[in-house]
Amino acid sequence: MPKYIVRYGIMRSIGVMASRNDIVYRRSMEVIVRTDRGIEVGQVLCEATEDALSHLDQPATGHVIREVSNDDVISIDGIDGDRKNKLAVCQKHIDALGLDMKLIDVEQLFGGERLVVFYLSEDRVDFRELVKLLASEFQTRIEMRQIGVRDEAKLLADYGDCGKPVCCNSHLIQMPPVSMKMAKLQKATLDPTKISGRCGRLKCCLRYEFDTYESIQKQLPRVGAYIVTREGKGKVLNQQIISEQLLVEMEDHRRVVIDASDVLTVVKKSSGASGGKTKQENRNISEQETGDSDSKSKGTVVEKKRNAKRKVAGEGAVDPKGGKPPRGKRRQRRRGGKNKKSSGGDVEGEK
């Protein structure tokens, strides 16, 4: 039983469809398929080979019923022409109920099994009454589907700044997250108006070459590293990743652009003020100095307490730094005298 990869639905979903007969379907053929939602119109992309399936992550499954006939084309045109009327009816009921939601689009399946309503909303919406009104209006099953701004662009956007159809509405199956780090690494402008897509978010194409840039950058010497080249030693000032070149300041203060292949050796950058010691050595030294200072301060406090006790007992105090009596006491002993305050505040000299 041959299998084909088919794109179907207004959200351009991808599925692997098995053919129930031996009919060969070519690329770009319009076919009628049965999916988990019902009977829909799809487009054949290619055969489901092992190489093609390796690029898909858990694709949907289904069956190819037949190729689109002339009668099917008339029915498809009728469904597309009636979509604006369905949008107007849905919007009328949303306004009447006062629901805080933005209607984006509606999708009527080819088989008529259900009507899918796509909407935007920041909060949860109680649309039970809306579903009842729409089900009685269109006599079919109603499916409410909340989407994001990127999905809105996938439904409504046409062309991007590059002049080509937007990626989300052409070949992208899933929209992976994009970060500002990707723009910085590729030296792209950081102006949000220039790196944002039709959805207002960062462009999906910023991710396409990010893995390549990242792998090349890992092979280049880092900015600030000291290197040895054929022309001498120098310091890396900047990287030109896509061309694999480096801006280097040589020892004679010349700035030159060299290829990464011209780098002979990468010298590890020292820590500067630490005199070439490693971070662990610096950490041990600082801890040792901190411990010494703590022990000295503790010793000083203990010595001061001992001096206070000696004063109470009438003994001579000792200098906490050198373990000797204070300087004034030493002078008095050399003179052989001792100053003593009388009870009346007079000072008497004893010899």
Image: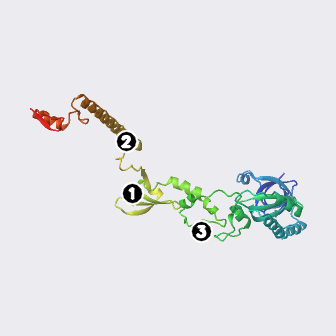
Tell me residue 94's x, y (percent). 79, 64
In this view, the residue in front, 156 or 343, is 343
From the viewer's perspective, tell me whether residue 350 is left or right of residue 138.
left
Q: Secondary structure at mark 2?
A: helix
Q: CA distance from mark 1 to mark 2?
A: 32 Å
Q: Secondary structure at mark 3?
A: helix
Disc 3: which residue: 193
In this view, the residue in front, 103 or 127, is 127
Which residue does the image show at 36% across and 47% down from the upper left?
274
Which disc number belongs to residue 150?
Answer: none
Disc 1: which residue: 234
Q: CA distance from mark 1 to mark 3?
A: 39 Å
Whether residue 178 is visible to the viewer of this picture, yes or no, is yes
Q: Does residue 166 lie above or below 270 as drawn?
A: below
Disc 2: which residue: 286
At label 3, the amino acid type is Thr
Considering every residue shown, the one lying at the far front of the view is 344
Q: Does residue 233 lie above or below 305 as drawn?
A: below
Q: Quadrant of residue 310?
A: top left
Which residue does the image show at 49% across and 55% down from the upper left?
220
Task: Count neighbours of disc 1 (C-alpha within 10 A) and say few if under 14, some if 14 to 19, many if 20 or more.
Answer: many
Q: CA distance from mark 2 to mark 3?
A: 49 Å
